[in-house]
Amino acid sequence: MKLPTALKQYEATLQATLRPTVTITPTPAKTGTLESKFAGKPYWLKSEPYPTASTGEALHLLAQLNLSAIPVPAPFPQRGILQFFVLNDDLTGLNFDDMCEQKDFRVVYHEHIEQDETKWFTAFDTLNYGEEEDYFPIQKECALAFQLTETPISTSDYRFDELLGIEDVKYDVYEEIIDPYNEVNGEQGAKIGGYPYFTQWDPRGEDGNTKYSRNDILLLQIDSDMDNGILWGDCGVANFFIAEEDLRACKFDRVLYSWDCS
């Protein structure tokens, strides 16, 4: 990890925070049913109820990850398909009262994939998506490419200031630390694992709130990428977090979902 001179004194501390991170590169393209993708048509079985919101409307596929084809590190599952569904409304399924309550979003894991295509659900045009509005953040179906790397803690992470002992430094001194670090820490973009990026603040540590602090692992981040038709509000970013014990158990019913914009 190469650090600017102003950060050399923190090198050992930052080195200790390195986490495996799978960066995601989206490219607008049509995808197959079992492929990883942003938007598009998901893998789903006719025998299973399709995910719906509290309004009864069908949820839209935000992302699908075919884990057997992605270099995800443990404790991520090494096989199966992981899916993220959201409501196509002005909040994109966000629940401010409880960011883990899957009322208008859903995270679904298929451990075993049915190979008999006659059992796949394909009648997506029959689903009730409600009033169609131009709220959905991903305007183009995207194929995904993946690369495994390592990244240190991000400045957006609620633990960053305390870790470096800079909670009370003056603003100009803070800028001297933060600005060069943001050039090298790789917090933005789409990724699996690693550390999050926010345009505002980390909900896991907001005002000393520990309600969501157990959700320590970044399950998925999708950043605005206008070149590829991805836009969260005013150039925002979306994040999904999970507790390590839940991830090891392939239990995805208490995932924290948030998105913000500037």
Image (tube, grey):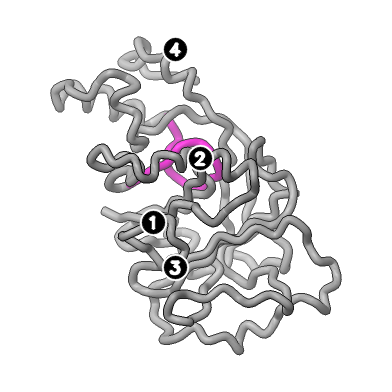
Q: Secondary structure at mark 2?
A: strand
**Whether residue 42 can be seen here:** yes
Foreground pick, 13 / 174: 13
Q: Which residues are magenta?
A: 185-198
**Whether residue 143 can be seen here:** no
Question: Where is residue 175 drawn, in percent x and y?
Answer: 22, 27
**Between discs 4 and 3, the one toward the N terminus:** 4
User: Do labels 2 and 1 touch, CB within 8 Å?
Assistant: no
Residue type of the residue flagged with mark 3: Lys
Is 71 displayed left or right of 116 in the figure?
Answer: left
**Between discs 2 and 3, the one toward the N terminus:** 3
* Real-space CA distance between mark 4 and mark 3, rounded to the nearest whole angstrom: 42 Å
Residue type of the residue flagged with mark 4: Ala
Tell me the mark number nearer the camera, choosing from 4 and 1. 1
Which numbered marker is on residue 217? 2
The residue indicated by pointer 3 is 103
Question: How busy is the neighbourhood of tag 1: few (under 14 within 10 Å), some, or many (20 plus)?
Answer: many
The residue indicated by pointer 4 is 12
Residue 165 included in the magenta stretch of the image? no
Tell me the mark number nearer the camera, choosing from 4 and 3. 3
The residue indicated by pointer 1 is 99
Question: How busy is the neighbourhood of tag 2: few (under 14 within 10 Å), some, or many (20 plus)?
Answer: many
* Real-space CA distance between mark 4 and mark 2, rounded to the nearest whole angstrom: 22 Å
**Between discs 2 and 1, the one toward the N terminus:** 1
Question: How busy is the neighbourhood of tag 3: few (under 14 within 10 Å), some, or many (20 plus)?
Answer: some
